[in-house]
Amino acid sequence: MKLAETGGPLFTAKWLEQYAAICFRRSPETGAFEVLLITARGSGRWVIPKGGPMKGKTPREVAAQEAFEEAGVRGKVGKKPLGRYSYVKRLDNGENLPCIVEVFTLETVSVAEAFKEQGQRQAVWVRLAEAGSYVEEPELRGLFAKLETRLRKIPPDTA
């Protein structure tokens, strides 16, 4: 569902806030940068790990925790957000609310064998250059492109 299709809530409701992580790594086989995509539990759409504010945690800490809970990923989280994107979140009661997501990068160091939401989602590592074709949100596609531009500047043996 697109933001424009939400009608009244787009202009009258409070926007939900979430924090997300684009988890990336170099492919062990090709050396190309890859990002982790997971499926949303309700819709099965390809998304990145994200969640709402948590008491006592900064936005970047929330992004890191969600990456671990939803995909078992641990790593180095960027100090500043890469950017933001918006989407429509369908609540359990069927209501659709606009949501703004602040996105941090997470350079993957390890992936756990067991984690909280294991078995509830599918996960796939895809080439960063192709990640945008998996997701619905145009602004998220733009963030993948922004990250790709940044990472191109890193020599292959340092990332």
Image (cartoon, rainbow, N blue to C red):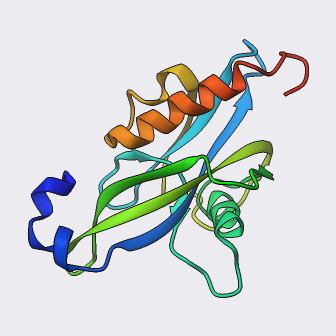
Q: Nearer the viewer, residue 130 or 5?
A: 5
Residue 63: % across, % down:
63, 62
Q: Is residue 137 above or below residue 116?
A: above
Q: Quadrant of residue 31?
A: top right
Q: Please state if 3 lies on the left or on the right of 128 as rendered.
A: left
Residue 23: % across, % down:
65, 43
Residue 94 in view, yes or no: no
Tell me which residue sits at (18%, 78%) in the image: 12
Q: Residue furthest right?
A: 157
Q: Which of 153 and 68 is in front in this view?
A: 153
Q: In this view, does 153 lie above or below 120?
A: above
Q: In which quarter of the image is residue 32?
A: top right
**Label tally:** 0
Tell me which residue sits at (40%, 60%) in the image: 41
Q: Please state if 76 lies on the left or on the right of 89 as rendered.
A: right
Q: In this view, does 116 lie above or below 81?
A: below
Q: Residue furthest top?
A: 30
Q: Is residue 3 above or below residue 28?
A: below
Residue 152: % across, % down:
70, 18
- The quadrant of the image that shows the C terminus is top right
Q: Please state if 29 lies on the left or on the right of 45 as rendered.
A: right
Tell me which residue sits at (52%, 28%) in the image: 145
Residue 64 in view, yes or no: yes
Residue 13: % across, % down:
23, 79
Q: Quadrant of residue 95?
A: bottom left
